[in-house]
Amino acid sequence: MNEILLVEDNPDDVDLTLRAFAKSNIANEVVVARDGVEALDYLFATGPHAGRASAPLPQLVLLDLKLPRIDGLQVLERVRANPRTRLLPVVILTSSTEQRDLESGYKLGANSYIRKPVDFQEFLEAMRHLGLYWLLLNQAPPQSA
Amino acid sequence: MLRSKRGTILLQLFFATAVALIIAVGLVSVGFVRSYARTVEQLVLLEDLPRAMAALAASARPAALRLSALITASVALTIALLAIVYRQLLREIRRVREGERALSVLTSQLRQRSEAAEAANRELEAFSYSVSHDLRAPLRSVDGFSLALLEDYGAQLDEQAHSHLVRIRNATTRMARLIDDLLQLSRVNRGELAREDVDVSALAARVVADRRRQEPTRSVAVTIQPNMTASADPRLLRIVLENLIENAWKFTGRQEHAATEVGCHRSKNETVFYVRDNGAGFDPAYADKLFGAFQRLHAVTDFPGTGIGLATVQRIVHRHGGRVWAEGDVDAGACFSFTIEPPPTNEEQ
């Protein structure tokens, strides 16, 4: 319940994000998908995750953009196109602030766009705010709306 | 163009000559036939039929011969003239065809070049996109795990080890800033210049407000002249003001009463905008080095920076057809001025 799906291919970033969550007292279970295909399999209960058909959706998806196989923007597009996941809160969490990433991200229906700061303390602060807002303050959309 | 004009004139000249010749032959033959008919008429009136017949026979042969010679000559001349005209025409057609071929070669060369330029542009964009995404990630690891070391194993590390780790983290911060500044410098060349009427005073006020938020401990007296406007790309003009105002704040860091002024004045039919401060200034002997990328006139330990900010300012001002220059002296403050060329009018385009 109330899990976070972290879509991130860089193992260092995975460790640092988990560390930031732990330091910010975010106790939600974190599921890691290492590319777009894994993320979509998890969300749509396909492939190795076929058994999850009736499992609830994660409370929040943290989506990196540059990913192997299927990139973040394509993941977002498919999530928004699927009636089961179209309302799922998706926060883009990436390195760049390229104009076209921001534009495509919001056009495709991202709920938020956060740039990962290089300074870990700033990153920690960003994760703390993010957890506070999306996991506590924000009212989640109804499931399978 | 000139050649084909000459060809047309030649053609007209030849046709005029041919027509004139044909008319001349016609006139000569009509005259001859008339005088011949008159002679015969007179002789017939005299009823001297045998003489008339003889005269007719005597004069007809040479006259007919002359006439046929004249007609043959003029026909031959006309044919010769037409042949020359035809050859000239063929030559003209060949020239035009050669011109067309040369033009199509040039057009395809031009197309190839613009395709190459487009490819280079796409490559550059892909490059900076990759820099933007991939170059920062390792820095996050370096900084994050250095901090993890300090936090998790700090007790086992001596003072020197702590100091090393702090240096590593400071270096990653500088590197991250360098990457961001370089990306910004490469971005100011991309895209169309989207000019609009900009309220420069309001823009400067927003930039100063941002600065105050980012450096809440600094106290800098800022005056902004009201009602300044310019026709410029607001996104790029903002980068200019951000860099100049950030510099003013940085170099007044050691001043007890730091002051910055943003204003403009008219000079020789142009508006000169300026950002002035009462900070550390610079040695005017090196003023020309200020705007080169990676050029710095101060040690990083005195005033941190990447040396890319003013190069970015210069690039943006040049894209607006303006000039940028700096005045100042050591410990006497600095004044950075720039102009924004008005957009070209329709008549000039």
Image: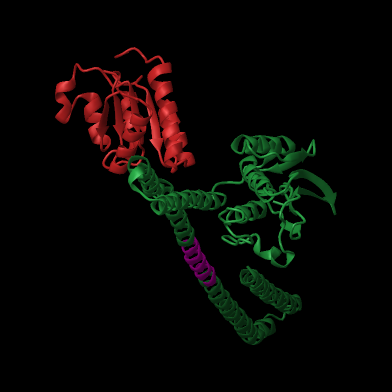
Chain colours: A red, B green
* Predominant secondary structure, magenta span: helix
Residue situated in front as seen by the camera: B237 or B95: B237
Q: How many marks?
A: 0
Residue B105 belongs to magenta span: yes
* Residue B306, image quadrant: bottom right
Q: What stretch is highlighted in magenta?
A: B95-110
In the picture provided, is B330 more to the left or to the right than B91? right
Query: In the picture provided, is B297 more to the left or to the right than B172?
Result: right
- Residue at position x 63%, y 48% in the image: B243
Q: In this view, does A119 lie above or below B82?
A: above
Q: Is residue A10 visible?
A: no
Q: Which residue is painted at 47% across and 64% down in the image?
A: B109
Residue B299 x %, y %: 60, 60
Horizontally, residue B103 falls left or right of residue B52, namely left
**Horizontal relation, residue B329 to residue A80: left or right:** right
Residue B137: % across, % down = 38, 46
Q: Quadrant of the N terminus of chain B?
A: bottom right
Q: Can residue B188 be seen in this view?
A: yes
Q: Quadrant of residue A129?
A: top left
Q: Does the magenta stretch include residue B125?
A: no
Q: In which quarter of the image is residue B327?
A: bottom right
The picture places residue B263, in percent across and down from the top left corner, at: 78, 44
Q: Which of A16 and A3 is in front in this view?
A: A16
Residue drawn 43% across the image and 17% down it: A137
> Whole-percent x and y of residue B112?
45, 61
